């Protein structure tokens, strides 16, 4: 029974959007780090790109970055029945709640491990494309089975216990953020005590390879012995203990007797006729523009809340913060911190724009309510502007969160951050650039026949931009949203005339908004 439950859970998790988005993002980021030095956040900058040391370090760093993925997959498996309000129905079945929870956990762990295979696959593929070879197969096996798999098992067990105890996805994500922040600030240590106390094995690997030459580090992975072996056995045992704690909590609160909820008393007669007439009288008194503003406000709240509550958004933000904290903890001074954020926090906003522009634009048609909405008093332009403003709010929040992570990291390192610099150098200009990209994504969705085609148009644009960069065609006159010195602000790059470029591309984006609002809508 447990095996069947695990298989069903594995199939459901692999079919989810969280799984495939994280898979694609990890492939892009690992492959990009192989070719671009600025993207090698937390990774080795010396030695062979596919040497044993690089393989080991990549698996360690990405097992830490996958904390948010583990929190999303395991937390969703634990809380699915509660959020869908099927907990009482499941609890009334003869299935043992501990076996049920264990099957769900096993399936989510399987999905987590399959998703993590994107890391070694992307590294080997990147090595082949760069002509550096795949690297030693034994190092991949050691890094995967001796380091990454135990780390992911511990993370899954930790979030299984947290979700069972707190009954909240927020608790899992906060726990992942705390662990990641601690690792970003503490770093590696070669002390024996740290080698045992570090659950992810960074310190143990550092101690096992202490004094090794660069040639030896590239040739072979450290032996699974001594402090490293004890560390792995210790934290696998801790993972088993956390699973036992989670199963105990599931067994105590998982089976709930079916309760008959009292029907709410009818209170239709308690509403006075005068109260029913008030909204109608107010709508008659308000002008057309105030009614449109009111519709826009509520639609923006609805659209933005729908995005903020998705696990996809939480995982993407978590991955971005992982890179931001890791990059910010290795530099000093506000200018260097801002530049590190600009270099490391590039991919996540692009993925957010690419994915959620399609989700927002096609939501009504996918739920088959577009014909119903078309006969209401809401104008199509109001709906489009609401989606655009919701996407802009999301991107501004990304800028605030990532900039805040850099400022907090700088403060914890003992340096007083300049909030004005973060606001004027990073949050505002980056949010503006991301909003321009969001407008382009919505415009491409508006001219596409379906969501997948809109995503394809945006992917072609991104691939074309990368190709132009490789060819050296970086003239900001012909690159949408570009400006001299991009992505650095004028205060760091020293470029002149950036404001005029932003004004010009903003005007082009405004034309796109007008076209998007006036294009005819197609209903399924």
Image: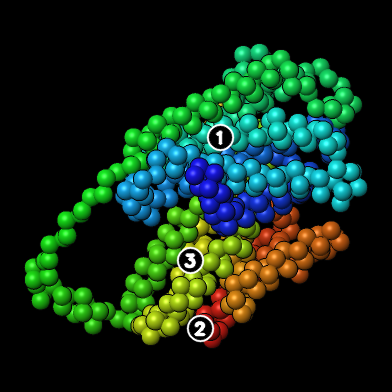
Give whichever of 319, 390 is nearer the camera: 319
Residue 270 x, y percent position in the rendering: 8, 68
Residue 49 x, y percent position in the rendering: 84, 39
Residue 445 x, y percent position in the rendering: 60, 74
What residue is rendered at 59% in x and 62% in y?
Answer: 355
Compared with 410, 487 (above or below) is below
Residue to which mark 2 is pinned: 523
Residue to which mark 1 is pinned: 155
**Among numbered discs 2 and 3, the one appearing first in the sequence:** 3
Which element is circle 2 on?
loop
Relative placement, left or right, of 434 versus 496 is: left
What residue is rendered at 35% in x and 48% in y?
Answer: 93
Compared with 222, 361 (above or below) is below
Residue to which mark 3 is pinned: 389
Relative placement, left or right, of 411 versus 306 is: right
Labels in figure, total? 3
Residue 136 x, y percent position in the rendering: 85, 35
Which element is circle 3 on?
helix
């Amino acid at each position: 029974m447990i095996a069947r439950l695990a298989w069903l859970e594995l199939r459901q998790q692999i079919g989810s959007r969280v799984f495939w988005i994280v898979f694609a993002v990890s492939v892009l980021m690992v492959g990009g780090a192989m070719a671009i030095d600025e993207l090698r956040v937390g990774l080795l900058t010396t030695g062979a790109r596919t040497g044993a040391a690089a393989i080991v370090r990549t698996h360690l760093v990405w097992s830490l970055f996958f904390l948010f993925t583990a929190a999303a997959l395991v937390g969703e498996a634990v809380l699915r029945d509660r959020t869908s309000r099927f907990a009482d129905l499941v609890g009334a079945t003869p299935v043992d709640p501990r076996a049920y929870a264990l099957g769900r956990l096993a399936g989510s762990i399987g999905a987590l491990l399959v998703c993590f295979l994107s890391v070694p696959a992307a590294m080997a593929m990147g090595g082949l494309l760069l002509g550096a070879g795949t690297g030693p197969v034994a190092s991949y096996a050691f890094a995967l089975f001796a380091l990454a798999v135990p780390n992911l098992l511990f993370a899954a067990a930790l979030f299984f216990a947290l979700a069972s105890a707190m009954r909240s996805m927020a608790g899992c994500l906060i726990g992942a953020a705390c662990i990641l922040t601690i690792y970003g600030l503490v770093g590696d240590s070669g002390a024996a005590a740290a080698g045992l106390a570090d659950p992810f094995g960074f310190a143990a690997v550092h101690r096992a390879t202490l004094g090794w030459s660069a040639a030896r580090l590239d040739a072979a992975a450290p032996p699974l012995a001594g402090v490293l072996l004890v560390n792995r056995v210790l934290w696998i045992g801790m993972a088993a203990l956390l699973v036992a704690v989670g199963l105990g909590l599931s067994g105590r609160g998982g089976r709930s007797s079916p309760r008959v909820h009292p029907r709410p008393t009818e209170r239709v007669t308690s509403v006075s006729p005068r109260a029913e007439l008030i909204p109608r009288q107010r709508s008659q008194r308000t002008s057309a523009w105030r009614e449109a503003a009111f519709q826009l406000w509520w639609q923006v709240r609805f659209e933005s809340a729908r995005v903020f509550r998705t696990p996809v958004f939480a995982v993407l933000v978590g991955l971005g913060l992982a890179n931001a904290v890791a990059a910010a903890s290795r530099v000093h001074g506000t200018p260097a911190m801002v530049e590190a954020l600009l270099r490391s926090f590039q991919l996540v906003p692009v993925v957010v724009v690419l994915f959620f522009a399609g989700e927002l634009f096609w939501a009504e048609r996918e739920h088959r309510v577009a014909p119903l909405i078309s006969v209401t008093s809401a104008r199509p332009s109001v709906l489009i502007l609401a989606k655009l403003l919701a996407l802009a709010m999301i991107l501004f929040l990304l800028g605030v969160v990532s900039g805040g992570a850099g400022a907090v990291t700088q403060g914890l390192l003992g340096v007083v951050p300049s909030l004005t610099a973060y606001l004027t150098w990073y949050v505002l200009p980056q949010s503006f650039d991301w909003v321009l990209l969001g407008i382009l994504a919505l415009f491409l969705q508006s001219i596409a026949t379906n969501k997948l085609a809109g995503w394809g148009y945006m992917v072609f644009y991104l691939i074309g931009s990368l190709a132009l960069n490789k060819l050296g065609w970086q003239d900001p006159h012909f690159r949408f949203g570009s400006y001299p010195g991009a992505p650095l602000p004028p205060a760091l790059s020293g470029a002149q005339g950036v404001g005029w470029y932003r004004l010009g591309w903003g005007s082009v984006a405004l034309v796109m908004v007008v076209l998007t609002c006036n294009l005819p809508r197609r209903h399924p």
